[in-house]
Amino acid sequence: MMDAANSIVLILNLMTFALIEYVDCIRLPATCRQAPVTAVLTPFPMFSFFKKKPQEPAPLATAPETPALEPDMPTASLPASAPPEAQTEIVAAVTPAEQKQSWMARLKVGLSKTSSNLTTLFVGAKIDDDLYEELESALLMSDAGVDATQFLLSELKRKVKNEKLTEASQVKIALRSLLLEMLIPLQRPLVLGQHQPLVMMITGVNGAGKTTTIGKLAKHLQAHDQSVLLAAGDTFRAAAREQLTVWGQRNNVTVIAQESGDPAAVAFDAVHSAQARGTNVVMVDTAGRLPTQLHLMEELKKIKRVIAKGMSSAPHEILLIIDGNTGQNALTQVKAFDDALGLTGLVVTKLDGTAKGGVLAAIARARPIPVYFIGVGEQIEDLQPFNAQEFVEALLG
Ligand SMILES: Nc1nc2c(ncn2[C@@H]2O[C@H](COP(=O)(O)OP(=O)(O)O)[C@@H](O)[C@H]2O)c(=O)[nH]1
Ligand SMILES: [Mg+2]
């Protein structure tokens, strides 16, 4: 009983520290890791960035003390009760309000075309065949695809009938809740601390945003006290290798690279090196296109096999990075990579551009693979956990 209570106290303490440090790094990069700064925390997590499985609860005596509050600093607050999953520490993404606003604003701008197509058709409309037809076109144009569009329409008609809706504005609200229901299963945090090291293979076609996402993720992981090692597995393009190496030097992250190396061998070295150094997370960058006749999927499968030779449970995560602007083609990519590799998660990038957003509905219907993060720009904080509620809000206002 006491042990359980002690563990909860320790987890709360650790959480305070993770959150404080994270806010510290984002707000005051220059003072990061120097002076402890406290910040206003939203009541227990709005959403989580990562989930952390604590390995062995340390004795209470070694638990860090709560830092003294600076007089002019906002105050930290903690939830009154223990988190629902006492075993798992949820590391909340504490995004300062103004940053969160700009992030949401960018998502809204990115999805504005779809949003206006989907919302204007309800203005002053009657509930009739014309309305459903217009909605069908708008959903298809949003990249939702035929299957998700038909599903949403038939569910919507059913809801209108069952709930005896009479106003177009009510239909819009019903559509919002259907879309939310559809996308919620995709909302899952990446779990840290279950494997030592956690090995992640990052895949995707050229230009999807693999290397950029690895960079952003590495910084988020570091901010959560995770040591990171990168494997420059896109060995076919010297520029790609250099991009990662230079980035690693600048950000104090070790990068394993080999000139003209075999990507599988680079990945294998990285896993071994992480085991030897006690590194927490290994991310393996991969190529998106090969200049030879070699089939990309065969190459990726080989990397996966060879990683498993270095650590039998690895790779623990196989992520596919997709460019949010590629429309229905994104679904084709998800299917192809999933069939070949067995994906564990997705990252959808460039939702700040001309992306239409509906492809997430198509993915939810066809391959409901968790969307761990979405990207709305090139800055670190532009990579955020996928939150179905926020996404639907950006789409349907
Ligand atoms: N606007 C925007 N650009 C992005 C985002 N993610 C990546 N990029 C850009 O997309 C381009 C290709 O990214 P890169 O990481 O090199 O792709 P890779 O070939 O898959 O490794 C780069 O110019 C990135 O800056 C995003 O979320 N928003
Ligand atoms: Mg790259």
Image (cartoon, rainbow, N blue to C red):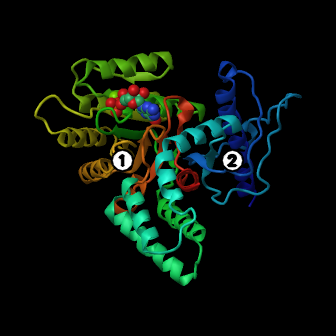
Residue under label 2: 11
Is residue 271 something one can see in this rendering? Answer: no
In percent of width and height, residue 115 lies at 51, 52
Q: CA distance from mark 1 to mark 2?
A: 27 Å
Q: Residues within 10 Å of mark 2 (few under 14, many from 20)?
A: many
Residue 26, labelled with which disc? none
Secondary structure found at label 1:
loop
Q: Residue at x 83, y 30 (%)?
A: 73
Residue at x-position 47% and y-position 64%? 182
* Amino acid type for the residue under numbered disc 1: Ser
Q: x, y (%) of residue 361? A: 42, 58
Badge 2 marks a residue whose secondary structure is helix
Q: Is residue 53 above or below residue 35?
A: below
Mark 1 is surrounded, within 10 Å at the Cα level, by few (under 14), some (14 to 19) or many (20 or more) other residues, namely few
Residue bearing mark 1: 313
5 or 171: nearer the eye? 171
Residue 210 x, y percent position in the rendering: 37, 34
Question: The disc labelled 2 sits on which kind of residue?
Answer: Ile
Asked whether residue 239 appears in the rendered view, the answer is yes
- Quarter where residue 163 is shown: bottom right
Ligand 1 image position (quadrant): top left
Q: Is residue 147 left or right of residue 377?
A: left
Q: Earlier in the sequence, mark 1 or mark 2?
A: 2
